[in-house]
Amino acid sequence: MKVIFSPAVEEYLFELTELLHKKEYFGFKESAVQYVTELIMEIRNDLVKSSKRIAPHCFSQYGEKLQYVSFRKNKATQWFVFFSTYQDKEEIIYVVRYISNNHLIGHLL
């Protein structure tokens, strides 16, 4: 099993660190970096084990046959990770194509 992030998702996660610090969700930039790093590690470690759902059609712009899982980081924030799966000769590859949270897309799910 391998989890990889699309270039767009990698860019989003980098920008998320800056945004979380700039909007003062975290007082120190290091704390914002740690939060995003922990989110990435949780996705890498737990995506396969998590309960998967078929993504609504409105997310089809990010890929075909998308599924999603959710990760709760605290009482107020839940992250939704949208991905596609591919079978390689030796393993299943999970390609993360989009990430957002309940504050932005919760009403669509």
Image: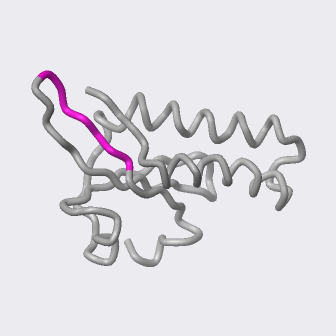
The picture quadrant where one finds residue 12 is bottom right
In this view, the residue in front, 29 or 5, is: 5
Q: Main secondary structure of the magenta part?
A: strand
Q: Quadrant of the N terminus?
A: top left
Residue name at image x 48 percent, y 56 percent: 99
Left/right placement of residue 59 relative to residue 26 reads left
Residue 36's x, y, as percent? 64, 41
Residue 28 to residue 80: above or below: above
- Residue at the front extreme of this rendering: 7
- Residue at the right extreme of this rendering: 27
Q: Quadrant of the C terminus?
A: bottom left
- Residue at the top extreme of this rendering: 90
Residue 50's x, y, as percent? 32, 40
Residue 28 magenta: no
Residue 64 to residue 2: above or below: below
Residue name at image x 89 percent, y 46 percent: 27
- In magenta, the rendered stretch is 90-96
